[in-house]
Image (cartoon, rainbow, N blue to C red):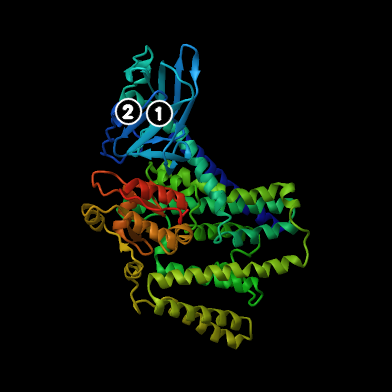
Amino acid sequence: MQRRGWRYSYLGVVMRALLASLLFIISGACYAQGFSAANQGLPSGEIAPEFLPVEQAYQLEVEIIDKQNLRAYWQIAPNYYLYQHRFDFKLENDQGAVDLTVEMPAALSRSDEYFGEVQVYYHSADINLKAQQLIERGTLSLTSQGCADAGLCYPPYTQRYDVDFSTGILTPVASSSEEAQTLTLSTVSATTQESSSSDGLLYMLLLAFMGGVILNLMPCVFPILSLKVLSFASSTDHDRHLQSWVYTAGVISSFVFVAALLIALQQAGSAIGWGFQLQSPAFVIALAYLFIVMGLSLSGMVELGSNLMSTGSGLANRGGLSGSFFTGVLAVIVASPCTAPFMGTALGFAVSQPPQIGLLVFAALGAGMAAPLLLFSYSGAARALMPKPGAWMDTLKQLLAFPLYATAIWLLWVAGRQTGVNTMTAALSGALMLALGLWLWQRSWWRKALALACLAAAVSLGSMRGLDVHSSDTAQLSQGKLAWSESAVAEQRNAGNPVFVDVTADWCITCIANETAVLLTDDMAQAFADFGVVYMVADWTNRNADIAALLKKYKRNGIPLYLMYTADTSEAPLILPQILTKQTVVDALQAVSKKNADISAVL
């Protein structure tokens, strides 16, 4: 009875903590909604960028090719772009609308703050229009919409021309509504700011929530979540609901804590970003050891006692409320290298905003990550998909150990890439001593002294540094790639070479997936050579203030980041999406290169 009373006292503390978190999120949302247009997340003293009027940002030329064909050519200012899907063309005469065939050029893929994954045009958009019937005269209406990289989006803008096919003369039409369409820059800015303070924030919260949901499918997180779902098979409704909410509290509080630490360090002048903890070899090795211990426990090779569990080594498979809370904490720790498709934009937005809004976005990320477990907790339909409790649970439990072993191998490989093969060998030796120490701990009392010696040796071996020095630059140069630096980019562009910059890290799973599937294939390497584009690698595996400054420059807080520069040093680079396809990269190569190349082998 006393234990039951303690349990509900503990529950009260947890529920009060959850209530405080919810009040924090709600107050943050209210604060963000009331954010004035004068304060748009710019640092103190920073002046908002000046934007061009829409007519200067997108200069349109229209010409009559022949009796049926027209050409519309937009010259787009540097750092501005037009949406492909927002173009609209109409040709009308006295008899009504004339059917048009529109031939659009290839566009670039972009993750857009307002429309999601879209196709856009930088520099220019050259569009051919063909009337499906012969007419002498008509009125051509051309509607477009674009944005500036610095954040301003213009409303749709329509331009009209009287077209005389018989004489080949085009005459601009000034309509009574033109004044309403050609809004002044101050009006456009106010409209954009007003919408971004509410709709923009809600959109980013949704992106963060979806990114958190997808994190559960990543190889770092899925085994941990599976262990918790397994425990639901034989739990009561009360226990399921309680543990799922405690897990949620662990996830959200951990995300908010990491975000607060990140924001505090950045404001103190540290050049760090999301995933910064994985730039420490000591943290990576310690995390690998934790996965090894968890794997050994699931395999039944060691039985972790309560004392060891309290130190955190058995957090994911520990029962009770503390086990649920720290399972959420562990899930957040291992989730940092697994950037979900929607996370990059949301995290970049979070760190460019005041701390209240930034923490709100991270809280939404945590809520999304916890949502699937809550669904299993409350949804009978979801639980009905689970088989009945039985021997299969022990088999599955043992099977889940192998993804944990695989994750440990990957983490030790990351540590080796950060430092060198000698340090990785020492860490592997430490893992062996760790397993031996845990095995001896289960034996007679005198063997526990030997077990402690083995565990001490494991810590010592895992802490060894200075045995070798890691340098990824040599490996990159041997693969025909150059190490990134601002001066190297400028040197190549001044020499007339377009440049592609790949900001990556060995602990970034999304980066590795893009490189394996797209960037480092033989066909793509040949495409870079044929288009004459120099491939540069900015390796952020270890801390690098210059790379952190590059990310900040382009409003990114994490990786991957892909930049495609033209040879013209006055032009800003194209920013490619975080999830690459061969078509996206080839389109970018064509956009920045003056060379023609055969791309059939790539696509």
Near-viewer residue (486 or 295): 486
Q: Determine the residue positioned at 39% across, 69% down.
A: 418
Asked whether 533 or 29 is in front, the reply is 533
Q: Distance between the residues labelled 1 and 2?
A: 10 Å
Residue 193 figure quarter: top left
Q: Nearer the viewer, residue 531 or 490?
A: 531
Q: Which of marks 1 and 2 is nearer the N terminus?
A: 2
Q: Mark 1 and 2 residues: CB-CB less than 8 Å, in contact?
A: yes
Three-letter code, disc 1: Ser
Residue located 33% across and 26% down the image: 63
Percent x, y of residue 132? 49, 24
Question: Which quarter of the picture shows residue 66?
Answer: top left
- What number is the disc on residue 60? 2
* Foreground pick, 119 / 431: 119
Q: In which quarter of the image is the N terminus?
A: bottom right
Q: Circle 2: is it few (<14), some (14-19), or many (20+) Cα within 10 Å?
A: some
Residue matched to label 1: 144
Q: In this view, does 63 lie to the left or right of 569?
A: right
